[in-house]
Image: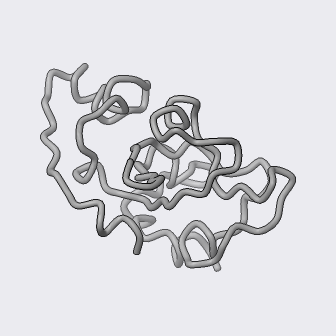
Amino acid sequence: PEAPQVVPWFKVAYQGPAVSTCKGRWVAIRKGNRVAYAQWEDAGPFRTDHWQYVFGNERPKPNLNKGAGLDVSPAVRDFLGLGDTDVTDWRFVDFEEVPHGPWAQYGDNNTFVINQRQGGSQTVGSHSNADLIR
């Protein structure tokens, strides 16, 4: 199917062809009882068309990266204490669901950083980790 049919926020985020509707979206990544928040950068390099994994319930397909379904930054890796092939749970979250934490301090496309530069203060609500996995 086409992106408008599988990306829940497509209608509000679409900016034209070749512009990602996922880049910059926040994701919650859980390992055990720790949750890190990060922003989606890109898809690939091994699979860029497996929407059933990203937006559905399928497991990642085999790839050259030992079947990894999510590559994370060193900061997320260290925060969660991940090894090379650890299993995590993740989901897209709205910015309002992202609590303040180390992820709020860095990044040119980071919503927290942008709000701070503009002199605004975005307050975000707290949430339960129990609903992390759909």
Q: Quadrant of the N terminus?
A: bottom right
Q: Quadrant of the C terminus?
A: bottom left
Residue 104, image x and y in percent? 31, 31
- Front position in the image: 110 or 19: 110
Locate residue 84 relative to residue 25 in the image: left or right.
right
Look at 39% across and 44% down and name the residue there. 37
Look at 24% across and 36% down and name the residue there. 100
- Front position in the image: 40 or 85: 85
Q: Look at the picture and state if 2 lies above or below 119.
A: below
- Front position in the image: 12 or 107: 107
Residue 10, image x and y in percent? 45, 65
Look at 22% across and 51% down and name the residue there. 96
Quarter of the figure with residue 13: bottom left
Locate residue 107 relative to residue 124 in the image: left or right.
right
Locate residue 118 relative to residue 48 in the image: left or right.
left
Look at 36% across and 64% down and name the residue there. 132
Q: How is the structure coloured here? A: one colour
